[in-house]
Amino acid sequence: LLTACAGTRDTRVAADAPDTVTGTGLQSQDIRTMATDMAAKIKASGVLAPGREGERASFFIYEMKNDSSDTIDKEIILTKLRTNLFEAFGRQVKIIDRSPSANDLVDAERRMKERGQVSGTNDRKVSGSDFVLKGTIKSRDRQAGKLRSSYCLVTFELTDLVTSELCWTGDYEMKTESEKSVI
């Protein structure tokens, strides 16, 4: 029993260090790189630049569909991307939180203000949005004997919510190979 516990190893590593637990599919450094790259590309595109009168553009992140063969926590990708976008733009754009929990909180706060349970007024409207950002994860996987190859493509799209024009799109792609033991 003591020899089994002696083999445990816990080590803190840098968040952008390559994963030592590998295989095929997106790794932690892919998520970090992807979020940094997409935020920089969206900002460089100028799509979300303030209007002629200095009015800030607004957007929300809708969803990420996982059409890949890998089980992926899509929220970790979207959360990291939202954080990087906020850091890249600061207060130059309005990032709207359209999550169900945020909508519930806004509704509850407005009801409490209407009933006089809390101070404040409801004289401001809930922010509308100019754009929506959404994404998809797709993969192409191959298996031959012990060797597995996976090509992963993550695509983000920024769509104008008035005209439905696709205003910006960007891809992150990666490919891995893994050789598994038959044991």
Image (cartoon, rainbow, N blue to C red):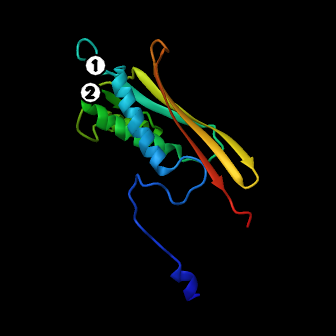
Residue 108 visible somewhere in the drawing = no
The amino acid type, in three-letter code, at marker 2 is Gln
- Position of residue 62 measured from the top left corner of the image (x, y, whole percent): 48, 32
Q: Quadrant of the C terminus?
A: bottom right
Q: Quadrant of the N terminus?
A: bottom right
Marks 1 & 2, CB-CB < 8 Å contact: yes
Residue underneath mark 2? 92
Residue 98, quarter of picture = top left
SS at mark 2? helix
Question: Residue 50 bears which disc, if any?
Answer: 1
- Position of residue 68 measured from the top left corner of the image (x, y, whole percent): 63, 40
Q: Is residue 59 left or right of residue 90?
A: right
Residue 22 visible somewhere in the drawing = yes
User: Which residue ends up furthest to the bottom in the rendered image?
Assistant: 2
> Which sits in the foreground, 62 or 66?
66
- Position of residue 26 measured from the top left corner of the image (x, y, whole percent): 54, 46
At x 53%, y 82%, the residue is 5
- Position of residue 82 measured from the top left corner of the image (x, y, whole percent): 39, 38
CA–CA distance between discs 1 and 2? 7 Å
